[in-house]
Image: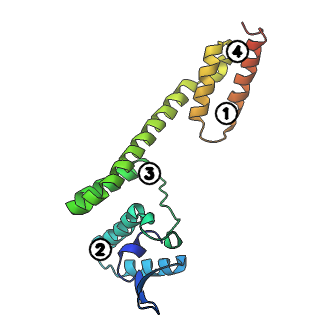
Amino acid sequence: MRGARYGLPGWVREVTQRNGKTKYVYLERAEEAEATGNDYLAGAVKTSEIAGRQLALLVMAVYADQEAVAASNRSWHHVKVSGPWAGEFDELLDGIVREKLPDSAVLLLEPVLAKRREQHEERVTARQRREEAAARLEGIEDGVAVLTVEQVEQAERDLERACTGWTPRYSDLRQKLTERRRQLTDGQGD
């Protein structure tokens, strides 16, 4: 639904309207897109053709400018990457695009590539900060009772940064820090 229907033959049809104007009709249902994609992939014979067609679909899905068509024809689907190499996906795909596409196509994609590079750098920085915060929290549970106000505040900031979801450990640590903060404000933990 995203990308290929704007770029591959057979995925868009030209229809002549009653007033004589030409209208482009895109695949509108996910089932149509899936069937057309399966036919496109089934047309490949060699391993390199299969990989190339899969890569072509992926590139079109990632780089498709949804604002280039009317809102009613846009795909609201997004490419979601997961797995051990997910953090490197954008950079790897952008590298392939820069290496394999003609210079004229890369020049047209440059604003998109620059934005994706900036987003990648922001994600890398955020991941590094999460990892640093998690490292500072290692073994802190045993020493919560002697933390100062500043150390409690730092641990709470680290907890917010390191915690990407609920875990029993972080929930317990949050409770311990809250109790220590209460002790310090009541003058009991000096």
Q: Residues within 10 Å of mark 4 (few under 14, many from 20)?
A: some
Measure the alpha-carbon separation of dots 1 and 3: 26 Å
Please state the total of marks drawn on the protein image: 4
Quadrant housing the C terminus: top right
**Secondary structure beneath label 2:** helix
Measure the alpha-carbon separation of dots 3 and 4: 39 Å
Q: Nearer the viewer, mark 1 or mark 3?
A: 3
Residue 111 appears anywhere in the view? yes
Q: Residues within 10 Å of mark 1 (few under 14, many from 20)?
A: few
* First along the sequence among labels 2 and 3: 2
In x, y percent, where is residue 11?
Answer: 41, 80
Which mark, by number, is residue 86?
A: 3
**Secondary structure beneath label 4:** helix
**Secondary structure beneath label 3:** helix
In x, y percent, where is residue 180?
Answer: 72, 18
Which mark, by number, is residue 145?
A: 4
Q: Residue at x 33, y 79 (%)?
A: 44
- The kind of residue tagged 3 is Ala
Horizontally, is 101 left or right of 125 in the view? Answer: left
